[in-house]
Image (cartoon, rainbow, N blue to C red):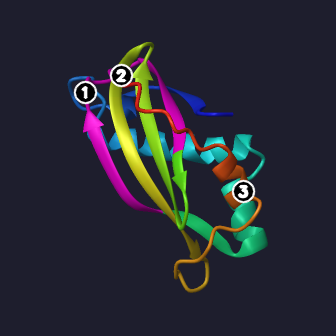
Amino acid sequence: MLGHDFPIRVYFEDTDAGGVAYHASYLRWAERARTESLRDMGMPHSDMQRIHGCFLVVKRLAVEYARPARLDDLVQVRTLIRRVSASVVLEQQVRRGEEGLAVLDVTLACVDAASLQPRRLPEPWLGALRALVDHGGSSQ
């Protein structure tokens, strides 16, 4: 899995009065796509918290919007792992078919569940994520 694709339908609740996807909807879609990419790897967030007492949080996020998604559109969120070190750097592309709608640059940090202090990402997540680093550029 070098890049994970997650389909999303744009619902009425995702849009403004004009039927255009509200900017914050892209953040929710990206969160779902990140969660499902870990689940598809066989390493869900819930296991990280239950077994290792830690979880991933968004440390930094930047979004560049190119085109609007609209009510009833079927969009795809592609999650690409760009770098894994003390943090995990992702690129998430929101597309409608071949048309690029938005790109999110996301940095995740691992924190201890009890103290909320930063900590090292546990194995097997660290090794699995490093193995999936995509060194290509944005295809947006």
For numbered disc 1, what is the local secondary structure? loop
Q: How busy is the neighbourhood of tag 2: few (under 14 within 10 Å), some, or many (20 plus)?
A: some
Residue 109 coordinates in the image, percent (x, y)? 51, 66
Q: CA distance from mark 1 to mark 2?
A: 7 Å
* Residue at the image position 56 percent from the left and 63 percent from the top: 56
Residue that mark 2 sits on: 100
Residue 95 coordinates in the image, percent (x, y)? 42, 23
For numbered disc 2, what is the local secondary structure? strand
Q: CA distance from mark 3 to mark 2?
A: 30 Å
For numbered disc 3, what is the local secondary structure? helix
Q: How busy is the neighbourhood of tag 1: few (under 14 within 10 Å), some, or many (20 plus)?
A: few
Residue that mark 1 sits on: 66
Q: Quadrant of residue 113?
A: bottom right
Point out the stretch of residues depicted in magenta: 58-81
Q: Amino acid at mark 1?
A: Ala
Image position of 84 (left or right of 90): right
Q: Amino acid at mark 2?
A: Gly
Instruction: Say which of 127 and 49 sits in front.
Output: 127
Tell me, yes or no, whether the two marked residues, 1 and 2, touch with CB atoms within 8 Å. Answer: yes
Q: Residue furthest front?
A: 135
* Residue at the image position 69 percent from the left and 76 percent from the top: 53
First of labels 3, 2 by sequence position: 2
Residue that mark 3 sits on: 127
Q: Main secondary structure of the magenta part?
A: strand
Instruction: Say which of 85 and 115 sits in front.
Output: 85
Say above or below: 139 vs 135. above
